[in-house]
Image (cartoon, rainbow, N blue to C red):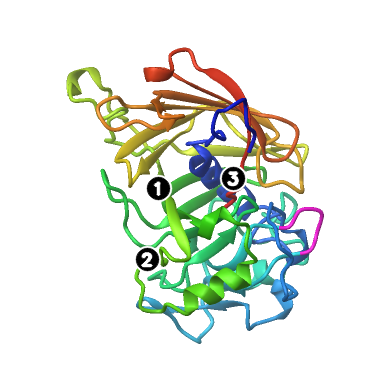
Amino acid sequence: MSHCGSDSPVVVQSETAIAAIGAAVFATQNTGLIGRADESKGRDLPTSTVTCPTFASDSSVSACLALDGNTFGTNPGQYLWRNLAFCQFAGPAKPAWWRTYHNIKFPSQGVCEAVKASPSGITSGTVTGLGLVGQTVELRYGNGAGGDQENLHFGQNGEVLFLYSDYESGWLEGRTNGTTVTFASTTERQVLIKGIHGKNYQTLYGNVRPPQDVYNDLKANPTVAEPSADILTKVWDRTVASQLAGDRFYENKDEASDPTASANSTLSVQWVSNVAVAKAGAIVRTQDNVRRALGISSITADLKYGDATCCWPTEGQVTTSYTTIFNLPSANEKAFTEEVVDFTSTCGNVNVTQRGGELGDGKTSSATLYHCI
C-alpha cells in the first residue's frame, strides 16, 4: 500500500464487499473455480511446494458427491467438491488460495459431472450444452455443508484471510450460505450474496511469512479456538451479504426517514465481448463485527473485469456509505462516513477517497487490494 508523507497506509474498508462480488463473477466462468485448473486467475504470493492437479482428472481433489447431513458422502451427487490443500496454480498471476475447500451445488448429478468433465469449464459457449440456462447454483466455502474447514489466503502484505460461508455471522443481522448464481442466459448471471464471513489477521510483527511456516505454527496450537495471538493478530472481522428485501438502507434511529428495501438487491453480471461486467446499481452490506459498524456499498459505475489474469475490476466504481448511528471506520484516527473506490487498468491498484465525518472533504490516495475471494 502507498504512503503519503507521514500518513498511515490507506486501508480500503470496502475491499471485502468488492472481493465477494468478484468471487461470484469468476466462479461461473472458465477463469474461476469452475474453470480448468490452469486457467484460474487471481493474485497471491509465495510459490506453492505442491503442484495443483487438474480438476477433471484427479478425483482426490475434485468429485461430484452427495451430502449426508453436514458431511460429504462417498456416493456421487450434485455437489461439486474441491479440496486444494496448500495449492497455488501456475499462470501469469497466481490465485489466492493456499488451502481451499469449495462445494458448488448443481441442479443434478448429471450437470455436476458434465461441468467437471468440460475441457473449458463454464463459458458462454458451454452454458447451454451443460443445461445451465435458467438454473441456479450455490457456491459455498468449507469442507462440507457445515463448513468445518477454513479457507486460508496469504496476501503479500503479511496478512492471512480466513474465509467461511456456512457459519451464521454478523453483529447486526445473521447472514450465511455463501452465494447463489442464476444463469439468466448464456451471457448473463443473476447473483445474490447470501452470506460470506471473512476474518483477517496479520502475521507476527507484520512480516511476510511463507504460508507453510504460518500453517505449521497454527497446527502446533490445535486447542486455540481463534488463531493464536503469538502467531496472528486480528486486523478485521467482516460479514458480507447482498441487501435483502426488508433491510432498512442505513439502520437509522429515525425509521420514518430510512427507506426499506422492497426487493433483494440482485447483481446482474453480463459478458460483453468475453469481458465480465458487474452492472451498476447492486447494493452489498458489510458488517464490521469488531467495530460494530455497517457499510452500504453500491456499484456506482459498471465494474469491468478487463484483465483475464486479474481477480479485480480494471474499470468502474464502488461507493460505500457508513451510518453515523454506529461506530465509523477511520483513517489516521479520523472517522469518515463515505468511501469511493475507483479502479484503474493496473490489477489491484485503486484510487480511494475517504471523506465526511472528521475527515471533511478528505483526499484521494492510491492503494493496493490483496484479498481476493
**Crowd around label 2: few <14 · some 14–19 · many ≥20 (10 Å):** few
Report the residue at 65% width, 53% height from top: 156
Q: Is residue 177 left or right of residue 26?
A: left
Q: Which residues are magenta?
A: 90-94
Amino acid tagged 3: Gly
Label 1: which secondary element: strand
Where is residue 211 drawn, in percent x and y? 62, 67
Q: Are marks 2 and 3 in contact (CB under 8 Å)?
A: no
The disc, 2 or 3, on the residue closer to the chain's N-terminal end is 3
The image quarter in which residue 283 lies: top left
| Residue behind mark 1 | 238
- The image shows residue 340, relative to residue 26, as above or below, that is above
- Asked whether 113 or 87 is in front, the reply is 87
**Residue type at the position of mark 2:** Glu
Residue pointed to by mark 2: 226
Q: Quadrant of the N terminus?
A: top right
Percent from the top left, x then y, of residue 78? 52, 72
Secondary structure of residue under mark 3: helix
Residue at 48% of width from left, 60% of height from top? 162
Q: Is residue 161 left or right of residue 357?
A: right
First reached walking from the N terminus: tag 1 or tag 3: 3
The prevailing secondary structure element of the residues shown in magenta is: loop
